[in-house]
Amino acid sequence: DVQMTQSPISLSASVGDRVTITCRASEDINVWVAWYQQKSGQVPKLLMHIAFGLERGVPSRFSGTGSGTDFTLTISNLQPEDSATYYCQQANMFPLAFGGGTKVEVK
Amino acid sequence: QLQLQESGPGLVEPSETLSLTCTVSGGPLDDSESHWGWIRQPPGKGLEWIGSIFHLGGSHSKSSLKSRISLSVDTSKNQFSLKLRSLSAADTAIYYCARLNQGFDFWGPGIPVTVSS
């Protein structure tokens, strides 16, 4: 089974900063990684359905890169509303798996 | 707009079976491009994929849960269901149903389930 390892577990940054979250797959998953944002007490929201494919309505300050085993989610010009936990998920094959999550605090 | 809604008990006793149903509205369950899935989130923890099913009945589940899980689909009711057997306190979580279409793009609001006597 493919395992997904996210880092860091948490980070704190200021408004306007650029932050990067990393996700590593235990084997090659091509570009099939999805990214989610979950704000406190809310349902997860799909940000990207493929390593670089932004969902409709997601601000362009969110971007993704990567292929194979290493993926990144970058938030440029961090905003207060970006405070949330972010998860990656491998979508290449069953069984699916989520990463452990990265909690982003906006100072 | 597609909507999903979980239903089932909020409290289940240890060793019993949890039965949850997800009702899909605003679109067909028999979409050839979509799978339908269950994800859970224990209190204060991360997301855990449990299993997914296609409208024709083919299913996949998390390896560690495979012996305890049954997934089914009823296209006439636009519903899909999860049964999880032999519950323990470790199964206490919010259970979400969601559509899988290159990522889980539509989610139900989630149903909290507590395993306790």
Image (cartoon, grey):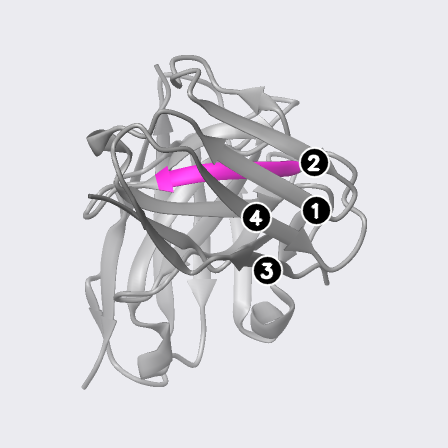
- Disc 1 and disc 2 in contact, CB within 8 angstroms: yes
Residue A70's tag is 1
- Judged from the image, the secondary structure of the residue bearing numbered disc 2 is strand
The residues tagged by marks 3 and 4 sit, at their Cα atoms, a distance apart of 8 Å
Relative placement, left or right, of A23 versus B11 is right
From the viewer's perspective, is residue B22 above or below residue A1?
above
Where residue A15 appears, as percent x and y from the top left, is: 25, 32
Please provide the residue range marked out in magenta.
A33-37
Q: Main secondary structure of the magenta part?
A: strand
Relative placement, left or right, of B112 versus B81 is left
- Disc 4 and disc 2 in contact, CB within 8 angstroms: no
Where residue A103 appears, as percent x and y from the top left, is: 34, 52
Residue marked by disc 2: A66
Which residue appears at 79% of the width and 43% of the height? A68
The residues tagged by marks 1 and 2 sit, at their Cα atoms, a distance apart of 6 Å
- Disc 4 and disc 1 in contact, CB within 8 angstroms: yes
